[in-house]
């Protein structure tokens, strides 16, 4: 085998392998969540009274090129023991087995399956939300905006708490505590490719 | 002047029917709210506790609104003359009434602020969201909780004094003072001032 006959296929293989990996792994470098300026909050309704809580600890893996969102991926993990409310009573109550069962299910997770652009800076992120061992497919509309050197992904969606067995037994009564829970998020991300 | 029959109030000496209605309605609501307040705070986290807290808040806001109406009425209408009594007693009664009116406002307002500070906006009867005059604030809520409680204990104490004074006038002085606040009977309001128990 002449050296040339070796080099050409090797070069070709290298180029194609490189191109292949370029296309197969279109996923860009992961962005970093800026926890201090990020928020995941939710609102429940008790006898018509909106009660807001927020999670103090969560992490996110976001790899997304806003120009090619199809190849992107978003996953979130939320510490269920970190829900905080205005009152210490609820802080102590919500990690219990009736509610989020933080001991049995320390994390609630979201893993995207498909991401579609729906407009400038707007995406529908479909994926699986798992809370307390129950999984549901959801579609989350996300708005993405540049904020200085970072990007802010924000949006809100509604889930039904009983889909995830949050509030069992006597608390399953939705006339006392509404089934719908509004979730609101605002994630500040560093290192996302430009819009 | 010893037996109620020898000094029975004429209609002119009675409180206005609107004052009488407000007095007894608020008496029921205030005593009820104090009782519910004492009971509910000892309950474990449960739908019953949530329900009682909400009813307690609705009652409190209603007491606040009716007290405003009552104060406006009181300031624009003449009170019936009180029976003769020693000066110190008149002073004591006036002070007690002043304290009652003050607490009719202070107790519900402190409770409302406490609820807002604890992150539970008050939604009257489950349908009408009321404004929060303080935002959610853990430290503030922990200060307002005992304030609301102690103001309520104070209200309960003045209510006890007020009732004791009224009963003293009725059973010891027998001066017909209590009858001024009794609803007029349809038949013969003057000669049958029997006490409902």
Image (cartoon, rainbow, N blue to C red):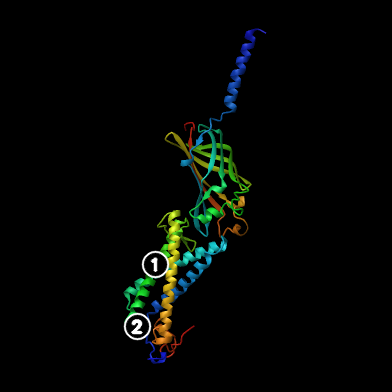
Question: Which quadrant of the figure contains the N terminus of chain B?
Answer: bottom left
Which residue is at 39% across, 89% downward?
A: B8
- Please identify the quarter of the rendering in which residue A5 is found: top right
* Nearer to us in this view, A13 or A96: A96
Position of A114 relative to B1 (above/below): above
Judging from the image, mark 2 belongs to the subunit labelled: B
Q: Position of residue B191 (x, y in %)?
A: 42, 91
| Vertical arrangement, residue B155 with respect to residue A26, above or below | below
Looking at this view, name the residue that lies furthest to the right: A1
Residue at the disc numbered 2: B82
Q: Is residue A61 left or right of residue B141?
A: right
Location of mark 1 (residue): B105
> Can you say whether A66 is above or below B132 in the image?
above
Q: x, y percentage for residue B104? A: 40, 69
Is A149 in front, or is A153? A149
Q: Residues within 10 Å of mark 1 (few under 14, many from 20)?
A: some
Observer-nearest residue: A44 or A107? A107
Foreground pick, A140 / A7: A7
Residue found farthest to the top = A2
Left or right relative to A4: residue B83: left
Residue at image x 59%, y 58%?
A171
CA separation, marks 1 and 2?
A: 25 Å
SS at circle 1? helix
> Please, which chain is the residue tagged with disc 1 on?
B
Tell me the residue at 54%/47% (across/down). Answer: A82
């Amino acid at each position: 085998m002449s050296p040339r006959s070796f080099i050409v296929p090797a070069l070709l293989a290298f180029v194609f392998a490189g191109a292949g990996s370029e296309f197969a792994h279109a996923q860009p470098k992961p962005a970093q969540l800026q926890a201090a300026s990020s928020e995941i909050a939710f609102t429940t309704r008790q006898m018509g009274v909106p009660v807001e809580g927020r999670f103090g600890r969560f992490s996110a893996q976001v790899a997304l090129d806003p120009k090619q969102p199809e190849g992107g991926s978003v996953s979130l993990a939320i510490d269920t023991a970190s829900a905080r409310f205005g009152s210490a009573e609820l802080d102590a109550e919500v990690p219990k087995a009736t509610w989020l069962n933080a001991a049995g299910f320390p994390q609630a997770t979201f893993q995207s399956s498909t991401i579609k652009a729906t407009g400038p800076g707007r995406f529908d992120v479909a994926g699986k939300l798992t809370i307390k061992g129950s999984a549901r497919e959801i579609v989350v509309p996300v708005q993405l905006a540049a904020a200085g050197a970072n990007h802010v992904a924000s949006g809100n969606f509604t889930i039904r708490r009983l889909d995830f067995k949050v509030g069992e037994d006597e608390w399953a009564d939705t006339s006392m505590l509404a089934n719908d829970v509004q979730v609101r998020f605002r994630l500040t991300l560093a290192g996302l490719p430009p819009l | 002047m010893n037996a109620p029959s020898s000094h029975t109030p004429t209609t002119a000496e009675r409180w206005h029917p609107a004052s009488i209605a407000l007095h007894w309605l608020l008496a029921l609501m205030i005593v009820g709210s104090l009782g519910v307040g004492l009971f509910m705070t000892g309950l474990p986290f449960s739908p019953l506790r949530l329900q009682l807290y909400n009813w307690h808040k609705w009652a409190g806001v209603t007491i606040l609104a009716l007290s405003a109406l009552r104060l406006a009425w009181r300031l624009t209408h003449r009170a019936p003359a009180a029976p003769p009594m020693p000066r110190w007693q008149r002073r004591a009664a006036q002070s007690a009434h002043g304290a009652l009116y003050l607490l009719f406002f202070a107790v519900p307002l402190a409770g409302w602020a406490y609820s807002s500070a604890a992150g539970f906006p008050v939604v009257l009867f489950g349908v009408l969201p009321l404004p929060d005059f303080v935002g959610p604030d853990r430290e503030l809520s922990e200060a307002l909780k005992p304030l609301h409680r102690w103001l309520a204990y104070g209200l309960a104490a003045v209510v006890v004094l007020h009732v004791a004074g009224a009963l003293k006038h009725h059973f010891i002085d027998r001066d017909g003072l209590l009858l001024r606040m009794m609803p007029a009977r349809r038949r013969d309001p003057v000669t049958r001032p029997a006490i409902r128990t």
